[in-house]
Image (cartoon, grey):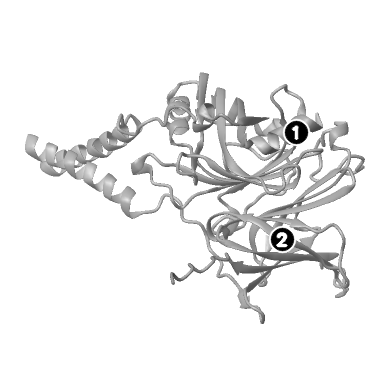
Amino acid sequence: MLRIFIFGILLGIAAAAGALYAYPAVDQHREASIVTVAANGGNIESFHVNVPMDRIMVGAQGRKRPLPPGMQWPGEELLADVRVELFKIRNARDIVIGVASRTAAKDGESDVIDWVLHLPARGSVYVTMQARALEGGYRRGDIRAGSREFQPLNGFMTERWVADTSGDADAPSGRIELRTNYVGQYVPEEEEEP
Amino acid sequence: MKYLATLFAGFVLGVALFFAGMIYNPFIADRGISPLSVTDAQVMSLAYSRVSSDNIVFTNDGESRQKPHPEKVQQLWEAPVRFTSAMATVVQDARGQAAGIGIKFSSQSESTSLINGRALIDSAWYVYMPGRGSLFIEQSENYWPFLTEVAFPAWKSSANNWKGSWIRDMTAGPGALGTSRVTGGNGELKGLATNGVESMSVRAYSADTGHVSAEGRLLIEIPSIVADDQARSD
């Protein structure tokens, strides 16, 4: 009887260890990436934010109706020219695949517009945008850094506001289109020895 | 039947022993001293509250211990973001003055391996400090010591809470010394590429509602060139 009990203990330890080893503690849901190849090199991936449905937060001093309701935006003078927005971001199939922040600020003479896109199963991308919009309403920025899947990539991203023209009652008022163009990291070839 | 019951009792005890061994495993070493505490470079310190109701906004799937704040904030319930939280908070400098706005995205990591004492969270910080610039911080945080030394004792206690003084570096990578990767984006921090560490100090924790009194701190190594520029501008 004692042998069976001890065997049971060993079996329990082995089963628990095996279960922990075999089954992942975390299994992030993945949506297939929708990536196209750019004509002049690199890969293009598009995201968008449906406004106002995907807005999580709009923080800026002087807003009469805070989003989310009940939010207390700090009143420090230091943050007078800072506007921070949090969004859910969607892929080209209109499925939520991550979250993002957009920070706009006036810092002395220069304007700051920064995006951080966070895709849980893949990593994060940090983009600093040029303050001035280009022809066609685009704004372009450089990918400054990335984590995990995006860590070895550089490239650029464009943002554009597209107003909804469908006229549907439940349609968003518009969308922020984000188009990233990833280019692999430049690795200089080793010089051949003479 | 008697043998089967004995086998089952042994099995249950074995499973319990295994999990007890995991929680009190002496071979999962504490990393000890932070690599930034022995650096010659200047270190920037940014503190924030880990209590969700102290933040400007905190949101997650709405079913976790840490409740979203404010109550009506949109929750991250969609499958791809269900294990993710987003936070916006005021970060304070070493003198306790507001230094800027910090945004943190955290997701449970698929590299988590409880059998090896690794309960990992992949997180990304964006910090904007007016007059100084912006920082992007990417890191993996290991919550295993927190789970075994704070959350589990809180769950075990009859009052479902824990009080004490617990402080630990949470950052476990991607740097080889367990540091985060920090990139400067704007202002005087533009082009900065350095290391950081995030620590957490907890004084009270509830197994029902999460952090009751807790603070996070980002320590960022500032290379001498940037620090000299800052001293000149001051």
Q: What is the secondary structure assignment of the residue under circle 1?
A: helix
Do discs 1 and 2 belong to a common subunit? no
In this view, the residue in front, B14 or A92, is A92
Q: What is the secondary structure assignment of the residue under circle 2?
A: strand
Q: Give the amino acid at mark 2.
A: Asp
Please state the chain letter of the residue tagged with numbered disc 1 in the rendered image: B
Q: Residue reaching furthest top? A: B164
Question: In which quadrant is the N terminus of chain B drawn?
Answer: top left
Give the x, y percent position of residue A117.
67, 56
Give the x, y percent position of residue B159.
50, 21
Location of mark 1 (residue): B230
Dot 1 alpha-carbon crowd within 10 angstroms: few under 14, some 14 to 19, many 20 or more: few
Location of mark 2 (residue): A142
Residue B203 against residue B222 in the figure, above or below = above
Q: Quadrant of residue A182?
A: bottom right
In this view, the residue in front, A58 or B193, is B193
Residue B204 against residue A110 in the figure, above or below = above
Q: Is residue A172 visible?
A: no
**Labelled disc at residue A164:** none
> Which residue is at 87% across, 64% downward?
A133
Q: Residue reaching furthest bottom? A: A39
In this view, the residue in front, A28 or B17, is A28
Q: Give the amino acid at mark 1.
A: Gln
How much space separates mark 1 and mark 2, taking CA atoms? Answer: 25 Å
